Amino acid sequence: MSVDAKKGGTAKGAAAPRERLELAAMGMEAEFGVLLDGRPVKPEHLFGDPRAFLGDGLMHRQGTSYHLPNGGAVYFDTGVIEVATPVIEIERGAPARTGRSLWEGILGMREALDAWELRERREVRLVGFSTHYNISFELPRHRQGRTRTVGKLALLLSYLLPFPVMLLATNRRSTGVGVRPRGDRIEITADFTPSASLMIATATLVTGIVREVMSWPSFELEMLDRLGLPVVRDFAPIPHTSRKGWLAHASCYRRSPFQSDVDAPLWETRDGRLLSLRQVAGLTVKHFWHPIRRISDPFTFRLIGSVMRGRVPSLLDLDDRPAEYEDVGRLCTWDNLFPERELSRSRYERVLIRAISGRRLTMYGRRYRPTGMRGWSQVVFRREDDGTRHAFGIDYLIGHLPDWERGG
């Protein structure tokens, strides 16, 4: 067996199996419509690929996807620009790290577009469209059985998550909150939120609840009644509008929750209570208070409680969708809520930042230069003494991170 095989690498010519991350992880994505001089355009028609405004020298990921210096990526997807974070291991502060990474990517993209505008004498605006919150699902198949599959988990969460997510992440023009099973992860879909702090609060709430529900003995819907969780009577999600999954659409309710008074007792639950949207959300959060707290930073934990109690306004408390949606990166921006001196980078982030920078790594006396990525979980290197290519999982590379960061 070669040294690389022993050490977790895949040599040139060998099949590259899809590698499951060893650590529970999360990630986020945000999608934006593009307006050129006030008119909607498809970014692929305007730019071709992101290098047109980000510049050359970026590490290519796949298709029109290129890596950003912070480990994230920018790409075009069916008429929108999408910014994605790297995978970030789930621990205390992980949602804040993930939100910071996403907004850093948005800021970097906006600054590059500002420079493009000056060169071309045109105006480009980014219009907030959607945000996706991804949480890994690593339950082994032998522990899933028939009642704990990722599909059943997605359906269960589509009953549980909508009202808390609505209160933190949606606006008066929103139409739904979705849950999609994605094999080794669960993806929650909602509107883009122009407040970085509310977006991080949503990520924190979603991650805490999803990870706790994954530990339940069953993902059958009866668990909601067994645990006394509030579920709106007669609610049933519809199939998601994109990919497999479920959507809590406004049409699934007797009235649109997005257009209703969040403090009016309009919602009859299956156990006979008449509650407001804020009360349903608050009771759900109260049930999961400890799991949410375990992965939250102190600021975000207080913010979630304040929104649930009505001490800090939800976007649904406003009369209409805020104007900040229409010019992301200028009307709403990242104000460095979590500087690195207060919240360090995660280990996965640090590995990917080193890889994307192209910094050499010495392992066992041989020097390797990173040249690309396979998905989010493997870094492709060129070994300098013989020119062969090798892929190493980011979990394995964590063990070499101290040497890499010292420039070894």
Image (cartoon, rainbow, N blue to C red):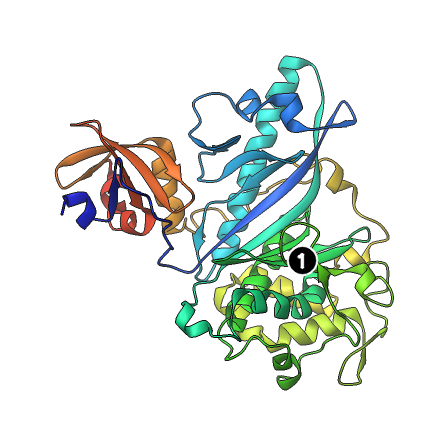
Say whether residue 312 is visible.
no
Residue 189 in percent (x, y) is at: 64, 54
Give the residue displayed 38% in from the left and 55% down from the top: 20
Tell me if mark 1 has few (under 14), some (14-19) or many (20+) residues whose alpha carbon lies within 10 angstroms of its own.
many
Q: Quadrant of residue 49?
A: top right
Residue 245 location (% of width, % of height): 63, 58
161 and 303: which is toward the camera? 161
Tell me the kind of residue under disc 1: Gly
Q: Is residue 86 above or below residue 235?
A: above
Q: Report the side of 266 relative to 74 (left or right).
A: right
Depth check: 363 or 3 in front? Answer: 3
The C terminus lies in which quarter of the figure? Answer: top left
- Residue 35: x, y in percent? 74, 28
Q: Which residue is mark 1?
A: 178
Q: Left of 30 or right of it: where is 145?
A: left
**Residue name at image x 63 percent, y 26 percent:** 44
Secondary structure at numbered mark 1: strand
The one of 167 and 215 positioned closer to us in this rendering: 215
Drawn side of residue 88 relative to residue 382, left or right = right
Res. 71 visible in picture: yes
Q: Is residue 326 above or below residue 272?
A: above
Total numbered labels: 1
* Horizontal relation, residue 143 to residue 85: left or right: left
Which residue is nearer to you in this view: 108 or 57? 57
Identify which residue is drawn at 41% across, 50% down. Answer: 344
Expressed as whole percent of the image width and height from the top left, the position of residue 99 reads 55, 49
Residue visible at 69% across and 56% down in the picture: 240
